Image (cartoon, grey):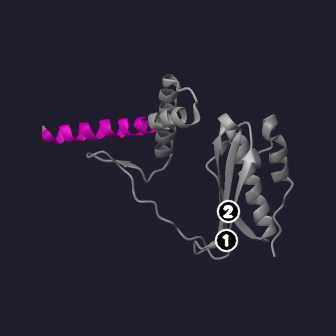
Amino acid sequence: MAKNTGIAVRKVGEVIDPARQLWDEARNEYLFNHYPVDLIEVIAKAKREEVEFLAACAMDSAFVETAVGAQCPEPQWVPHPRGIWKINCDAATNLSRWRGVVVVILRDEKGNLVDGIVAKIRLTTALQGKAIAMRLACAMARARHCAVVEIESDCKTVIQLCVLEGVPPWEIYAVIKDIGHWPIVGV
């Protein structure tokens, strides 16, 4: 009986901790930036993040459900074949202030940091931030004359818009078209 109680307490903690962190975020926004707190929106955000996390876990076969509970292996960096460069790009947004920060990091096949960009931007959607980060990643690859490069982003929408022949949303149309017009030329 004690074993089941321990599992139940752990499961409740897994739900409460992220919700508490989101509540703390909202409370701090109210206290320090005077933004009103909408409890329903905080709960909705928690649910969206839970669904996104569970979907990511379902897609990754490394996540295995065991009798004790969900176990996640420690993330490990896997080296790329020689001569392949890897660029990670991401964006963080504060849409209430129409601001964001984009980050682009270039690493060699050993995982060594070769170059990076951090830039403050003005935007109206989170998707714009992700698209601008991708454009900067492509610009970096071109400027560095990377013959073979893997660009990684956590935004499936931007990745699909970059590789498919669809029509992007108007707010990122120019950025996506820029990416499509920048062929990467090797040394």
Residue 88 placed where, x, y %? 64, 59
Residue located beneath label 2 in the image: 150
**Residue 123: image location, x then y, percent:** 74, 41
Q: Which residue is mark 1?
A: 84
> Secondary structure of the magenta portion, mostly?
helix
Q: Position of residue 65 (x, y in %)?
A: 35, 46
Q: CA distance from mark 1 to mark 2?
A: 7 Å
Dot placed on the residue nearer the N-terminal end, 1 or 2: 1
Q: Amino acid at mark 2?
A: Glu
Was residue 8 drawn as part of the magenta stretch in this picture?
Answer: yes
* Image quadrant containing the C terminus: bottom right
Q: Is residue 127 visible?
A: yes
Across and down, in percent, residue 41 comes to: 53, 26
Does residue 67 sit above or below 44 in this rendering? below
Residue 64 vertical position relative to residue 147 in the rendered view, above or below: above
Was residue 70 drawn as part of the magenta stretch in this picture? no
Contact check, label 1 and label 2, Cβ < 8 Å: yes
Give the extent of the magenta segment.
2-21
User: Which quadrant of the view contains residue 19?
Assistant: top left
